[in-house]
Amino acid sequence: MPVAAILSLQTRAQLFGHLAAMEKAGVPVERALLSLSVPARARAALDRLQKQIAGGSDMASAGLRSGLFSPLESNLLHAAQTSGCMAAVYQRLAERYTHRAQQAAAIKSRLLMPAAVLGLALFIQPLPALVGGQLSPVAYLWQCLWPLLLLAVLYQLGRWLFARDGQAATRATPLDQLQGYVPLLGTASIRRNLRDFFDSLGLLLDAGVPLLDALPKAAATLRSLALRTQFAQLGAAVQRGQSLAQALTALDFPGQPLLLGLVRTGEASGTLPASLLRYAALETQKLDSLTEQLATWLPRLLYAGVMLWMAYGLLTGAGFGPRLPAELG
């Protein structure tokens, strides 16, 4: 697994925050890397990055090859190198990871009570059957532990899916197609891809990169192969003489009406880069709001589910009310 896939959100925030501070202070990247602190498991990747930078490689390419940066981060930094705003992109990545780390910590803390109740319920619910001799000790332990094993597998699957979110897909997979149908999360993943695309496009245009050159560079930030294939049509449409707004009209994606309004206004007033960056900022706010709602309601739903399951077990299990022996029933 690439090192970038196993670095924590907080570590990524510290990494890009340090690079942003050094870039703003005018410190050469070689010296900035010397004072960079990473976990022990990422030390080898940092050493490779330092050697490649010393050999003349650019930060985006060296970071990806060393394993310290994810493909998405590398693509964003490629756009930043073209636009000459490395410090701004470093800072955006640092703020993004800091905010996501805070949200993840909030979700974990709010899940502690439901998780504790679930753990107690798993051991208490089959206890009457053990006392009554209907379950052997081994069967009791298995009945208690198999739900925990299933939850552990689901947790690892979630971590793996999160790690894949920073990888650039090279071919469509059934998992990618299924992800689009997951309520809320599928749409959020798509909108996150689109946010990165229009954020990069705005940065490139703001630096004076021509639209035809900026479109393929911004498309490289799209993790979804389906979206990348769809947005590859923009360059051909613009080359035929269409405006960006006209080219976007032929596509179908979440948030299109708002984007089209901003793009038309930006093209008419000559402020297209600012309009694209404004749209990316609005999408970031919406994604943050969705995550906050998830952090609020997921623990409540889990807690309610555990309570209903415990009540059902008490009402239907061997531990509720007196029962006649089988030979007398």
Image: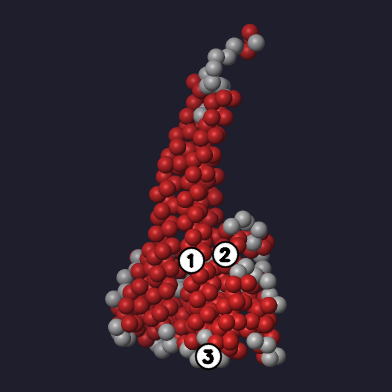
Q: Is residue 3 above or below residue 159?
A: below
Q: Position of residue 282 (x, y in %)?
A: 51, 70
> Is residue 118 shown to the viewer in this render?
yes
Q: Nearer the viewer, residue 55 or 107?
A: 107
Q: Nearer the viewer, mark 1 or mark 2?
A: 1
Q: Residue placed at 51% from the left, 63% from the top?
A: 287
Q: Position of residue 261 (x, y in %)?
A: 60, 77
- Disc 1: which residue: 285
Q: Amino acid at mark 1?
A: Gln
Q: Which mark is residue 189?
A: 2
Q: Residues within 10 Å of mark 2 (few under 14, many from 20)?
A: some
Q: Nearer the viewer, mark 3 or mark 1?
A: 1
Q: Which mark is residue 209?
A: 3
Q: Residue placed at 58% from the left, 87% from the top?
A: 268
Q: Residue placed at 67% from the left, 82% from the top?
A: 246
Rounded to the nearest angstrom, the CA distance separating label 2 from label 3 is 28 Å
